[in-house]
Amino acid sequence: MNDLTTEVKKLEIETLDNLKLSKAKNTIRAYKSDFNDFALFCTKHNLKSLPSDPKIVSIYLTHLSKKSKFSTLKRRLASINMMHRYKGHYLDTKHPIIVENLIGIKRQIGVHQKAKKPLLFNDIKAIIKQIDQSLGNSRKKQRDKALILVGFAGGFRRSELVSITKEDVEFVKEGVKIFVKKSKSDQSGEGMTKAIPSFKYNDYCPVESLRIWMYEHRNDLVFPISDKNVALIIKKYTQKAGLDHNKYSGHSLRSGFATSTAESGASERNIMTMTGHKSVDMVRRYIKEADLFKNNALNKITDQ
C-alpha cells in the first residue's frame, strides 16, 4: 500500500511538472505574481486563498476593479485558476457570482485601454537618424541601431530579442533568417524561423545593421541586455526623435511592424507568420488601426 502511495505521489509531482512545462517561464512567473497579490488580500481579510471559492474570488475582483483595468481582472482570474490547478484544486471560474460580477464591472468601468503607440516606419527612420547623429559610445549606438531595426523588421517581442544567440542567426543571399527557440505563443516549444529581407537603403537595413553589430560583438547572446532595457532604449530614442516617449514601450516595435505592414496591404496570414500570433484578433486590431486613415471617408475630399 505504501509503495502504491509513493508511486501516486511521484506521478502527481510529475503531472505538476508537466503542467508547468506547458507554459513559458515568464507566464509562470506572471501567474505567481498575480496569485501572490490575491493571497495577500486574503491574508489581510482572514480569507482562504488556496483552495478558495468563487465568492472570495469575486470579492477580490470587486476590490481590484477600483484601481485596475478590466483586462487586469481577467488576467488575475486566469492566474488564480491556474495556481489552483497546479496545486490539484478545482475553482469554478464560471460560477454566476464571478461571471455576473465581471459583467457588472465591465459595464461600470468599460474595457477600452489606451495602448502604447506603435512605432511606424517613418518613426523608425527618425530614431535611426538620431542614433547616427548622436555622440557617445559607438559600440552601444551600433547595438541599439541593430536592436531597433531587427526588432521592428521581425515583429519581435522583447523577450525574443534578448534571447537571440549567434547560432540562431543565418545570413543568406536574400537577407537573414533568425530562429526563435521559444516564445509566449509557442507553448509547445517547437520554435519558429523569421526571415528578414535586405532593404534597398543600408541606412535603415536591419540585415546590414545586424551584420555590422555581430562582426563587432563577440558574445554568444546577440543583444546581451534585459527585456526591460529594450523598453528603456525605445523611450530614450523616441524622446531624442521628438516623440512623446511616455506613449511608447518595448512592444511598440512589434505593434509598429504589424500596423505598418497592414497599412502597406500585407495579409493577416503574412503578418501572423512573422509575429507568431496564434489568434487573428490582435492582428485585426492592428489592421483596423492602419485602416483609420487608409480607408477614411474624407480621403475623397482631401484628394481634390
Image (tube, rainbow, N blue to C red):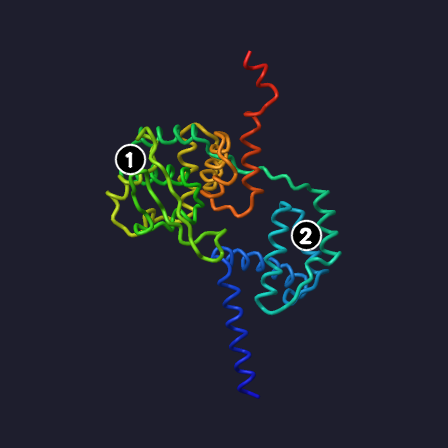
Q: Nearer the viewer, residue 222 or 18?
A: 18
The local secondary structure at tag 1 comes to: loop
Say which residue appears at 42% left-offset and 38% top-offset. 152
- How far apart are the two marked residues, 2 and 1, measured between alpha carbons? 48 Å
Q: What is the quadrant of the N terminus in the image? A: bottom right
What amino acid type should be assigned to the residue bearing mark 2?
His
The local secondary structure at tag 2 comes to: helix
Q: Nearer the viewer, residue 123 or 153?
A: 153
Report the side of 150 relative to 120 (left or right). left
Say which residue appears at 60% left-offset and 65% top-offset. 85
Q: Earlier in the sequence, mark 2 or mark 1?
A: 2
243 up-or-down from 10: above or below? above
Q: Which mark is residue 32?
A: none
Expressed as whole percent of the image width and height from the top left, the position of residue 276 reads 47, 46
Give the quarter of the image for residue 121.
top left
Return the residue at label 1: 136
Q: Which mark is residue 63?
A: 2
What amino acid type should be assigned to the residue bearing mark 1?
Gly
Report the side of 30 relative to 38 (left or right). left
Q: Nearer the viewer, residue 151 or 301?
A: 301
136 up-or-down from 165: above or below? above
Expressed as whole percent of the image width and height from the top left, the position of residue 213 reads 28, 41
Say which residue appears at 45% left-offset and 45% top-offset. 157
15 up-or-down from 190: above or below? below
Q: What is the quadrant of the C terminus in the image? A: top right
Expressed as whole percent of the image width and height from the top left, the position of residue 5 reads 56, 83
Residue located farthest toward the top when viewing the structure as drawn? 304
Expressed as whole percent of the image width and height from the top left, the position of residue 84 reads 61, 65
